[in-house]
Image: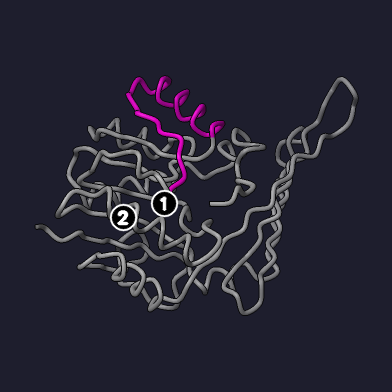
């Protein structure tokens, strides 16, 4: 697979500080409602915020992420919370060398939306399926076409509450593609030169229609799939900005 520029390499700690911590509590509650405490693999788990919450709740957490800086932050958060995380640096599209299987695998915060093409998405789903035990559960979320084409249309957000760390986020929707580019900029004040340093990354996300998600999940082998919204509180429909999938691997 060709080398690609990966998000989060440049400003992992800045992104980690920015993210709304309450969302991790909601994701953790969703997991707890679907799978019992036991061994769980968190795909694209980033800085480990969710994995730490679940480890504190009694889950045995393994975390896979491609970004070394994110994994370093995950180790720091685990140490601060006095929990154990097993960390694996790998691409969610290809970690066949990791032979362990799990009763539950999770992946949130749009992780699968960052896969650039449909074949990449299918590769990630296949890896999740192959690393599940028979009868296991795969939980993940995605942003929806409504989120991309309506919520992100002409979207711009600025945060200057900290005058030494100014954040700007602009979204650029690709018309007719169910895709969006996020232009993320931090302006960091450097006292020694009395000037701001620009730290910038562009993140690309792609989503699909519900029928396509269901077709892809079925094609890799999932026999039972539930599509939900609001962290599992309602059935999914086209008005939702985020969908949650509860996928079961058949028992042999």
* The C terminus sits in image quarter: bottom left
Percent position of residue 101, x then y: 23, 43
Is 77 contained in the magenta span? Answer: yes
Q: Residues within 10 Å of mark 1 (few under 14, many from 20)?
A: many
Picture residue at 54% right of the left edge, 32% below the top:
68
Question: What secondary structure is marked by label 1?
Answer: loop
Q: Position of residue 28 (x, y in %)?
A: 33, 45
Boundaries of the magenta span: 68-92
What residue is drawn where x is 25% and y is 33%? 60
Q: Which numbered marker is on residue 108?
A: 1
- Label pair 1/2, CB-CB below 8 angstroms: yes
Q: Give whichever of discs 1 and 2 has the lower sequence position.
A: 1
- In this figure, what is the number of numbered marks? 2
Residue identifier under label 2: 139
Q: Is residue 77 left or right of residue 152?
A: left
**150 to 46, vertically: above or below:** below
Disc 2 is placed on an element classified as: strand
- Label 2 crowding class (10 Å Cα cut-off): few <14, some 14-19, many 20+? many
**Percent position of residue 213, x then y:** 38, 71
Tell me the distance, in whole angstroms, between the alpha carbons under discs 1 and 2: 8 Å
């Amino acid at each position: 697979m060709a080398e690609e520029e990966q998000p989060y390499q440049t400003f992992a700690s800045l992104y980690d500080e920015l993210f709304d911590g309450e969302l991790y509590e909601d994701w953790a509650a969703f997991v707890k409602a679907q799978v019992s405490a036991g061994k769980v693999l968190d795909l694209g788990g980033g800085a480990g915020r969710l994995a730490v919450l679940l480890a504190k709740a009694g889950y045995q957490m393994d975390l896979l992420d491609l970004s070394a800086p994110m994994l370093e932050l995950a180790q720091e958060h685990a140490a601060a919370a006095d929990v154990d995380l097993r960390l694996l640096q790998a691409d969610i599209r290809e970690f066949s060398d990791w032979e362990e299987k799990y009763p539950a695998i999770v992946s949130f915060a749009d992780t699968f939306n960052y896969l650039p093409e449909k074949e990449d998405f299918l590769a990630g789903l296949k890896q999740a399926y192959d690393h599940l035990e028979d009868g296991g559960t795969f939980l993940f979320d995605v942003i929806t076409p409504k989120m991309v084409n309506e919520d992100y249309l002409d979207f711009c957000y600025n945060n200057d509450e900290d005058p030494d760390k100014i954040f700007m986020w602009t979204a650029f929707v690709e018309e007719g593609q169910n895709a969006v580019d996020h232009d993320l900029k931090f302006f960091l004040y450097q006292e020694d030169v009395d000037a701001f340093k620009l730290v910038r990354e562009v993140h690309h996300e792609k989503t699909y229609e519900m029928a396509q998600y269901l077709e892809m999940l079925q094609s890799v082998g999932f026999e039972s799939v539930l599509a939900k919204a609001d962290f599992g509180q309602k059935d999914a429909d086209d008005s939702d900005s985020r969908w949650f999938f509860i996928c079961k691997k058949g028992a042999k």
